[in-house]
Amino acid sequence: MISILIIEDDASKAEKVSKAILESPEIKESDISIASDLIQARDLCRKNLYDLLILDLYLPNRIGDIPQSTAGSEFIKELNTSITLFRPFHIIGLTAHEDAFKESDPIFEYDLWRIIKFDPQTNSWYKQLTTKLQYLIASKKALLESQQYMYDLGIVTALHLPEYQSILDLQGEWVEVRTPNDSTIYHKGFFQKGDKKISVIAACAQQMGVAAAAVLSAKLISQFRPKFLAMTGIAATVKESDISLGDALVTDQSWDYESGKHKTIQDDPIFEPDPKCIPLDVGLKSKFQNIKTNNSFLDDIQRKWRGTMPKERLQIHIGPVASGSAVIQNELIVQHIKSQNRKLIGLDMETYGVFFAAENCTEPKPKAFSIKSACDFADDKKSDDYQFYAAYTSAQLLYEFALEYLVE
C-alpha cells in the first residue's frame, strides 16, 4: 500500500518500529526497507521513491562510525537539495536522545515535519506513529481511487467540420471544458435515453493524421480517464466491396499501412510492408456484431437526414481499416494497401493513432473503437458530396451504440 524507509542503526529499535508498522494490515514486510547508516540510505533513495521516511536523528555515516546528533537533520537538508536522491513524500523523526530532539526540532518545524520521542517504556511513540500511518494509508487509497475511470466515454475526431460538429449536434447537454496548460478545448456532457445515461468527454484534434490523433487521445486519456475511447468521422472505403457511401465502418483491426521498409532491387524501388495490427477488443466486437444484425434504428437515422445522401439503405460493416498520413485519391495505392489485408474495408488517417494511444497509455486503459462512415472510394472521382452525411451517420451510430451497449 505504502512504501517506507527506516534509517536506524539500532537493530533492536528498528525491529520495534517495523513490528509496529506491520500491525497495519495494509502494509506488508516487503513494503519496508531498512538502512543502518547514511550511505545505505542514500543508495536506497537513489533507487526508490518512498511514501514515508522514518529517520533516527543520531546516525553514523557508515557502520562503525560514531553516530552524530545532527546527522538526521543534515540528511533532510541533503534530500532537499540533491538532484540524485528521490525525496520521500513524508518524513518522521524518531529519536530516543533528548539533545538530538532539541537540536533538530527547528529544522523539522521549518519543513513542517514531525519528531517523535522514542521511549520503549511507553506506547506514546507507537500511538503517534500508527496514527500517522493510518492517515497516509487513507490518503494513498484516495489517490489510487482517483486514478480510476472518470468518464464512461471519450470521443475524438480529426475535423471540426463536419466530424466534431456532428458530435456536438448530439443531445449531450455539452459544457465547454478548459484545463491548465492545454490549448485544447474539450466538451463534457451526457448521453441519455430513458433510465440509461453515460458521461462523455469529447475533443477535436488540431489537424488530421495519426500523430495528431495519438497526441489528442493521450491527453484526453491522461486528464479525463474514459472507460471507452471512440473515434468518429469520415473515411474512404474500397470500391470492390458491398459498402455504400454513408455506411458505417467499424474497425476490427487497425494498422499503419506506411510502416515497413523502402529499398531498391535492380534499380526498382520496393516497399516491404511491416504492419503491426492492433485488434478491436473481443467484447466490443461481439457487441458491434450484435448491433449489426439488430439495426432497425439505422432506417430512422437515415430518415432524419435532410441533406444530400445516397439512395442505398444505411448499413454497418465490421472489418480491417488501415491508417496513413495522406489523403488517398489513387486506386493503385488502394490496391497496394489491400494487399496487406485482403479483407480491407476502409482507409483513414487517424484510427491507428487512437488505438495506439489507448494500447500504450498508463492504467487504467480505455477500450478503443472507431466508427467512421464511408464518404468516398479513394479514387480519382473523390468528392466532398457525402462528407456531412457520413459524419452524421457515424455520430448517430455512436450515440445509439453507446446507450445500448456501454451502459452498465
Image (cartoon, rainbow, N blue to C red):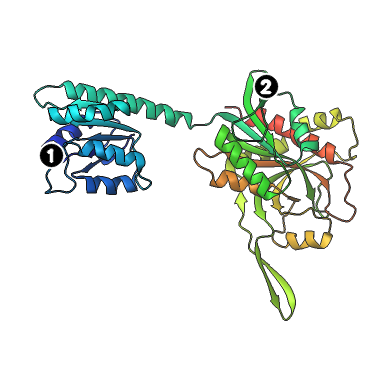
Determine the residue positioned at 27% across, 30% down: 107
Residue 383, position as x, y percentages in the image: 89, 47
Report if residue 296 is visible in the image: no
Determine the residue positioned at 68% across, 38% down: 156
Compared across the picture, whether 315 is left or right of 126 comes to: right
Q: Which residue is mark 2?
A: 192
Give the secondary structure at mark 1: loop
- In the rendered image, the vertical position of residue 242 relative to residue 71, given as above or below: below
Determine the residue positioned at 61% across, 57% down: 276
Determine the residue positioned at 70% across, 47% down: 350
Q: Classify mark 2: residues with Cα within 10 Å, few (<14), some (14-19) or many (20+).
A: some
Q: Classify mark 1: residues with Cα within 10 Å, few (<14), some (14-19) or many (20+).
A: few
Q: Which residue is mark 1?
A: 10
Between 100 and 17, the residue placed more toward the observer is: 100
**Which amino acid type is marked by label 2?**
Gln
- In the rendered image, the vertical position of residue 62 relative to residue 302, given as above or below: below
